[in-house]
Amino acid sequence: MTVSREGASIAPSFSEYTLAGAKETLKILETAAEFIPIPFLRGVIRVGVAVLQVCEVSKILDFVQMIC
């Protein structure tokens, strides 16, 4: 996240937008997976969501280590 020194505005970075968009897309696909006749699709989508969550947690831990 980038913070402007001139004001109190906080803007998410491109990678944060990408991560949020990917998570929302996977949520929609997971909901639609019940109606799509592809074997194991829902499981693959759940793995994708888990990978994104791990990446997000890793990014947070890196940030905390940078601060300390």
Image (cartoon, helix red, strand yellow):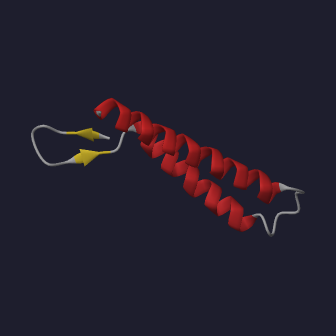
Q: Residue shown at 33%/30% (left/top)?
A: 66
Q: Residue shown at 12%/37% (left/top)?
A: 5
**Residue 67 in the figure: left or right of residue 33:** left
Picture quarter with the C terminus: top left
Residue 27 lies, in percent from the top left, at: 62, 61
Picture quarter with the N terminus: top left
27 relative to 20, above or below: below
Residue 19 lies, in percent from the top left, at: 51, 45
Q: Residue shown at 77%/63% (left/top)?
A: 33
The image quarter containing residue 6 is top left
**Residue 67 in the figure: left or right of residue 61:** left
Count of residue discs: 0
Residue 10 lies, in percent from the top left, at: 24, 47
The image quarter containing residue 35 is bottom right
Q: Nearer the viewer, residue 68 or 4?
A: 68
**Residue 44 in the figure: left or right of residue 40:** left
The residue furthest front is 68
Q: Residue shown at 50%/44% (left/top)?
A: 56
The residue furthest top is 66
42 relative to 35, above or below: above
The image quarter containing residue 3 is top left
